[in-house]
Amino acid sequence: MKREAAHAPRAQADDRRLWRAFARSVLFNVQAELVANLIRVGGVIFLARALEPRDFGLLRILIVLGAIAALIGTAGFPEAVIQRKELSGEHQTTACYLTAACAGAVAAMLFAAAPLIERLMAMGHLGAMIRLLCVPIFVEGTSAIPNAILQRALRYDALAAADIIAEGGFVAAAVALIYLGLPRLSLPGGLGARALLRGVAIWAAARFVPRGAPSLGAARELWPFAVSVLGGQTLVILSQNADYVMVGRLLGGRALGFYGMAWDLLRFIPERLYRVVGRVTLPAFSAI
């Protein structure tokens, strides 16, 4: 009974620290969403006046391919790192190597399949744009485990800063390419800058260096939860993006540009609410 009485105040203190960290994380997300969306909305207004709707249709397909690449490239391992109760350096190192290998394989497959995807979608210049994004996709994919480590520690101040830097990089790169006389490359270039800067910023914030070699035992311990996450995320990604692919293939890039922008406006508030609170729930509940 005395032991239980001694543990009770400590548990209450831990709960208070956790909820304070949760509240700080939500606050950081609010601040990041406010600043990032001011940059994003201002940039989109300028770009929408400078570019054509079909350019935004091509951008939407590139975003879909990026989402699929992120799904396969991480394979659920970041969530497994966040969720695991006892996380060792061996788990982190193994997950980092596995995600880096998956991200590299996905980037290589996208590079090779770019001409085929362009023909299937019947969108000119799509293949070159896909290849432009392969290196940024790889860099951002390798940052998945450092990102998970920051989330596990509820370091959403660092993640918020990475989001703001990435969004600023998107707008700056897109505007710069327009002024350089390369409007067709502005949106893919901006998307590549966003992924590259976010990946680099997360690596810098986490200061994580994998030590040693990957372990088969650690991979086996992470894999069961990673598989379940991968299955669920696959259904989500397919349900969220199948309409974009169908509209782009059947009606063309111009119609997809209008459709994508209208859908983004419709989902603007729910998406912001998710990013403010939803991103914090997995590490918070895992800590509980």
Image (cartoon, rainbow, N blue to C red):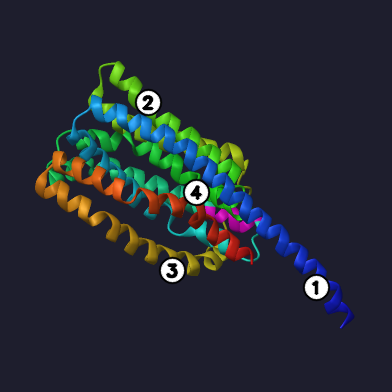
Residue 161 magenta: no
Residue in the picture at 23% in, 33% down: 128
Which tag is nearer the camera, tag 3 or tag 1? 1
Where residue 181 sits in the image (x, y, percent)?
25, 17
Q: Secondary structure at mark 2?
A: helix
Specify whether 214 is left or right of 107.
Answer: right
The Cα–Cα distance between marks 4 and 3, rounded to whole angstroms, is 17 Å
Q: Nearer the viewer, mark 2 or mark 3?
A: 2
Sequence order check: which comes first, mark 4 or mark 2? 4
Q: Is residue 213 at all visible to an observer of this figure?
A: no
Dot 1 falls on a residue whose secondary structure is helix
Near mark 3 (Cα within 10 A), the count class, few <14, some 14-19 or many ≥20, is: some
The residue at which mark 3 appears reads as 228
- Foreground mark, 4 or 2? 2
Q: Which residues make up the magenta segment?
A: 89-95
Secondary element at tag 4: helix
Q: Quadrant of residue 227?
A: bottom left
Amino acid type for the residue under numbered disc 4: Ala
Q: Does 92 appear in magenta? A: yes
| Residue marked by disc 2 | 173
User: Along the horizontal axis of the image, is 160 left or right of 246?
Assistant: right
Q: Is residue 94 above or below residue 184?
A: below
Query: In the image, residue 40 lies at what x, y percent?
Result: 39, 35
**Distance (Cα) linking label 4 and label 2:** 23 Å
**Residue under numbered circle 1:** 8
Q: Please tell me in which quadrant of the rendered image residue 231 appears.
A: bottom left
Q: Which residue in the structure is indicated by mark 4? A: 144
Q: Give the residue type at disc 1.
A: Ala
Q: Badge 2, how many Cα within 10 Å: few under 14, some, many 20+?
A: many
Q: Earlier in the sequence, mark 4 or mark 3?
A: 4
Amino acid type for the residue under numbered disc 3: Ser
